[in-house]
Image (cartoon, helix red, strand yellow):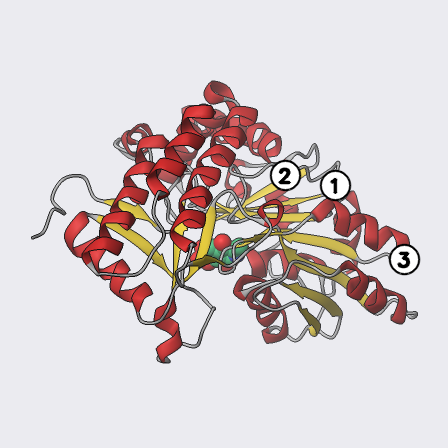
Amino acid sequence: MSLANGRRYLAIPGPSVMPDRVLQAMQQAAPNIYTGPLIDLTASLIPDLKTVAGTKHRAAIYIANGHGIWEAALSNTLSRGDKVLVLATGRFGIGWGEMAAAVGIQTEVLDFGLHSTLDLDRVKAALIADTAHEIKAITTVHVDTSTSFRNDIKALREAIDATGHPALLMVDCIASLGCDEFQMDAWGVDVMISASQKGLMTPPGIGFVFYNPKAEEARAKVDVVSKYWDWTPRGNPQEYYEYFGGTAPTHHLFALREALNMLVHEEGLANVYRRHATLAKAIWAALDAWGVGSSIEMNVKDPALRSHAVTSVKIEAPLGTALRDYLSENLGVTLGIGLGMAAGGTPEWHGYFRIGHMGHVNAHMVLGTLACIDAGLKALDIPHGDGALDAATRVIAQA
Ligand SMILES: *Cc1c(COP(=O)(O)O)cnc(C)c1O
């Protein structure tokens, strides 16, 4: 029978659950965009966004999803014909590189596959081989949402510096910002991008580019930057409309203000990161238990390399799809599909699922999801090890 009625829960890795306070903040009439409170509210977002990013440099806001922000970062730093070194540990790393290739940037792709983090020796070798310094920028992801690898960006910067190569380091934090600690300045990142709908608990539709003085120097050398994508007026607006190159995304700004109040000013980022880490450990403990003597396994074996915001899981095909369908039809929980792990339309595609645990997520939401997965495994007679819920609640109890 269906037990799905009640508050439904979307446990996919973005869009994430929006807090009621964030939803309520949008429940108001359109504000004036020329004078009045919106002007100060917008200015107040910038220091808080920089705090989350770990930077004292500039931030630009765009009305775009993550794909748009990928393009924004590329178009301010690279000219057609320039070369970028693309470091991929999953679908999203590859995707940013495809975006670069589509606008005429040459891409050298180091694809570390779906089961590995960055191999820094290969990165160093590629940079050392580039004696003419044709590589102008390196793109990578902090957390790849498809594989759920969390790459060590500080170590990447150290590896780049060890070669003396001057390329810009550009990092996608769309799935990690506000979930896993990120320190843009301390880790030597030149350009960092993110978007609103994951750890930042705000509807999809706005995104962010953070850039340092070295990136501004690169911007000055780019031959053509379209007026709309140019980060210069957005990051340093003389008039209010320049923040957005036109009408402000008014209600997204109300939502983001409330979300940043919660993350930065109330819970505090250190606690936000601890909450995500602990909830992730509860999920991994359950998966370890289910995996004993079964086909269930996490994609990332080393806990130190796992995202605290999303967990990618393999299970014998077609049981991933069967489990997802059962949970959403009967139990009111929707799990994520396995993105980029197997080609769509193949039997293997049905052998994956992901659990999103980013943003406005607490113990009861995670334990409820795990209990629903446990019920689904039983209902569908899917072989699995025992004791998953016990293992997860022990993690929570010891936190
Ligand atoms: C979600 C995501 C994107 C794409 O964002 P869209 O808003 O769907 O365009 C890019 N990179 C990463 C790491 C993501 O998690």
C-beta proximity under 8 Å, tags 1 and 2: yes
The amino acid type, in three-letter code, at marker 1 is Trp
Mark 1 vs mark 2, CA separation in Å: 8 Å
Q: Secondary structure at mark 2?
A: loop
The amino acid type, in three-letter code, at marker 2 is Phe
Q: Residue at the spot x=46%, y=45% of the render? A: 284
Mark 3 vs mark 1, CA separation in Å: 16 Å
**Residue 41: x and y, percent?**
46, 27
Taking 341 as reference, is 199 above or below it? Answer: above
**Residue 319: x and y, percent?**
30, 66
Q: Residue at the spot x=28%, y=48% of the render? A: 374
Q: Residue at the spot x=28%, y=39% of the render? A: 368
**Residue 361: x and y, percent?**
38, 35
Mark 3 vs mark 2, CA separation in Å: 23 Å
* Mark earlier in primary sequence (3, 2): 3
Q: Residues within 10 Å of mark 2 (few under 14, many from 20)?
A: many
Of residue 147 and residue 73, the one placed in the foreground of this image is 147
C-beta proximity under 8 Å, tags 3 and 1: no
Name the residue that disc number 2 marks: 182
Tell me if the residue at label 2 has its CB under 8 Å from ligand 1: no
Q: Indicate the quadrant where residue 338 lies.
A: bottom left
Q: Is residue 341 left or right of residue 237?
A: left
Name the residue that disc number 1 marks: 187
Q: Residues within 10 Å of mark 3 (few under 14, many from 20)?
A: some
Taking 350 as reference, is 370 above or below it? Answer: above
The amino acid type, in three-letter code, at marker 3 is Thr
> In the rendered image, is residue 81 in sight?
yes
Q: Secondary structure at mark 3?
A: helix
Name the mark on residue 163: 3
